[in-house]
Image: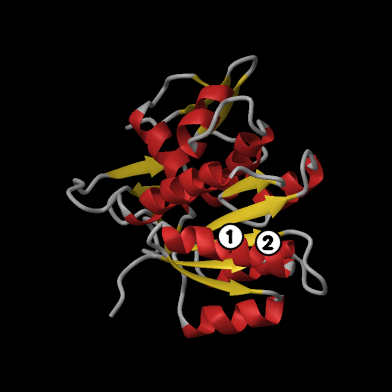
Amino acid sequence: MDRRPHIIVVEDEATQRRLLVDYLTRQNFRVSGVESGSAFRKAVEHELPAVVLIDVGLPGEDGFALTRWLREKNTRIGIIMVTAACDTVDRVVGLETGADDYIPKPYEPRELLARVKSLLRRTTGAAAGAQQVRVRMGRRVLDLERRMLVDPDTGSEETLTASEYDLLKVFAQNPNRPLQRDWLLEITAHREAEAFDRAIDLRINRLRRKIELDPTHPDALRTVRGVGYMFVPPSVE
């Protein structure tokens, strides 16, 4: 069996799809190219990929709908959305629907390759050699080895996307310490700080809904005005 990471490119423009598939294949990945949402769904049902590159502007079922469907199906798959250049709305919606990263068109192939490799490291590489560590965060417990949230009362488990896990891990390693938004963006997204800075705010909001008793009045992931965010562990009585 070929154990190389499998990447699916979802792009309706045939020339762009072929060029990207050929480029990533030369980088020693297994790559499939599909032109539509229906073809993508069939490919995923046949084999779960490691990373997906999804163009936003697909005919019919657009990239947002496909991202939402894939994220509901599996939280460990890395998703990179390909957006129109400088289209902030696309970036916001893409991250809200569960994408881990985005890259605007036109893009430099080497930058895309770097982001694919970074996402693969985040989604597949953390378990080996890690100590089993569990950190209480609000109403949940973060299991750093298994990369998931656990409800301590019911034992129910919820997996995390790569970007959500990266962010919670940084907070767990830096309790009671205000962390700058730009630094959080750079260290968890593996790109320069001038990139889309609302990404952190969107991820924090998603995580608050998962761990806080009252997401509108967060106790665990607190906002530090003028700085960023801070993780405050529950007090031990």
Marks 2/1: CA distance? Answer: 6 Å
Disc 2 target residue: 16
Q: Quadrant of the N terminus?
A: bottom left
Residue 148 - label: none
Q: Secondary structure at mark 2?
A: helix
Q: Please name the amino acid that badge 1 sits on.
A: Leu
Disc 1 target residue: 20
Between 203 and 85, the one nearer to me in the picture: 85
Q: Residue at x 59, y 66 (%)?
A: 9
- Tell me where residue 89 appears, x and y as whole percent: 80, 45
Q: Secondary structure at mark 1?
A: helix
* Vertical side of 64 occupied by 92: above or below: above
Where residue 8 sits, quadrant-wise, is bottom right
Q: Quadrant of the C terminus?
A: top left
- Tell me where residue 22 appears, x and y as whole percent: 52, 64
Circle 1 crowding by C-alpha within 10 Å: few under 14, some 14–19, many from 20: some
Q: Residue at x 78, y 40 (%)?
A: 88
